[in-house]
Amino acid sequence: MSPPDSNPTASMASTSTPSSSPSPAASPASAPHATPAALALPTASAADFPADFVWGVATSAFQIEGAADADGKGPSIWDSFCRQPGVIADGSDGDVACGHYDRLEQDLDMIRDLGVDAYRFSVSWPRVRPTGDGDWNEPGLVFYERLVDGLIARGIKPYLTLNHWDLPQALQDVGGWGNRATVERFVEYAVGIAKRLGGKVASIATHNEPWVMAQLGHETGVFAPGIKDRRIAAQVSHHLLVSHGLAVTAMRALGVTAPLGIVLNLAPMVPATDSAADRAKARLEDGKLRRWYMDPLFKGGYPRDVLDDLGHAAPYVEAGDMALIQVPIDFVGVNYYSRGMISADGSWDAKAGGLELTDMGWEVYPQGLTDLLVGLHRDYAVKRLYVTENGGAFKDPIGADGRVHDEDRTRYLDTHIAAVGEALRQGAPMGGYMVWSLMDNFEWASGYEKRFGIVHVDYATLARTPKDSAVAYRDFVRRQRAARGG
């Protein structure tokens, strides 16, 4: 551990100059065409974060593990989806990914060397229970025990996610998340993992981004399982929420004391203009993304405007379902990458917005993270909020010196961490921040073309190379820990 920084307000980026803490930018709703200069945020200060604030990195099983059929693992819907022609941008798959399954100890050491408090990971359901029900796969369970025990031995808190999209293909063959029976299979899975790992992990999240599973997987069909049916998508979203509530209840009955919650991908929805049409569309899109999930979890019902928009495609809700969904939870994880700019006619073009764009074509808009977190605190009685994913994809060639000089990513993380600090100052109950992602990986339909990692992966050799952003994040966490006497 390095000594405390001589300037306690130094930002994450070693090349940044501490700001004089200007006032927060105007909210995006009032300034939809704000220029980059209007988005200045105070640099992240140790004073912004409480002593128990958790700094971490995140990954998911399918994106890094590889070993697609090793040691008894069954196929997932993503294994099957990748076999369909044209659905993955570079024609790749997750068969090898980052080879994490065979490089566990090396990767655990890499996480330790970053000096973070926590590692968020997911369990692959088909690795531990290949058909989604029936026999459990002991080698798969042993792998995750080694992962959790290895993290603890290195002083890192394990943050476990049960479902990061890789449903066993055998369950999809009988209807997947569109089939109510999958709800029960998920509860069995949650209980099985909780029995094995629940006493060791720092928290358990039931689902990662149910909106993505429902909308991208079942309405637009651009993600696994590739279904294009609005009615099924709405039913899937409901089944995911019911399974969440039932799993939380079952794990608590089992005696799990670790905090339990769910992870949602969220963004403020901003009208592109002040027109009534754009404002109405932005309100509806906020309903589909944020309120459709947060309202049932905290208010006991789906938003009326979204139900009206769905019409006959609205989900079938059994008696008592909403009470099951509204079971108290300990936290909500927030995955944030950019704001949503909404125009009623679909004409908004991020390239014309005047802001820096990531390699995904998404605006770099840290103020949106502050607005989102403060809004969640204002609108819902959430005990604790975590930023469970935040990061940017940028083109990251290795330089002649063998290093990756990713100033754009370092700047992205710096400003977004500052945005979390601003949310804390405005009263949001923040518990931690986790970078997406630990290392470059299989980026779903983009294949290996997009790199989010703070560690570079050479996909030919699987060599890991920490980028400049990893060094900056490591040093920032060290300064935070030193400032709070840790």
Image (tube, grey):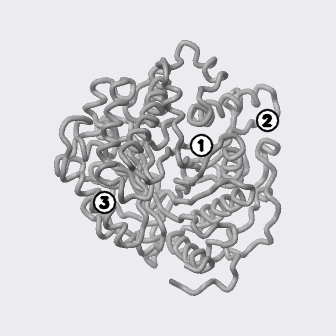
Left or right: 382, with 260 as reference point: right
Compare marks 3 and 1 and give the one earlier in the sequence: 3
The residue under label 3 is which amino acid type?
His
Q: Mark on residue 273?
A: 2
Label 1 environment density (alpha carbons within 10 Å; few <14, some 14–19, many ≥20): many
Task: Pick out the residue farthest to the top.
Answer: 312
Q: CA distance from mark 3 to mark 1?
A: 28 Å
Give the residue at mark 3: 100
Q: CA distance from mark 2 to mark 3?
A: 46 Å
Name the spot of residue 485 as percent of width and height, x first. 59, 80
Compare marks 2 and 1 and give the one earlier in the sequence: 1
- 32 or 247: nearer the eye? 247
Give the residue at mark 1: 266
Q: At numbered mark 3, what does the secondary structure look like: helix, strand or loop?
A: helix
**Residue at horizontal 61 percent and vertical 84 percent from the top:** 4
Left or right: 315, with 374 as reference point: left
Q: CA distance from mark 2 to mark 1?
A: 21 Å
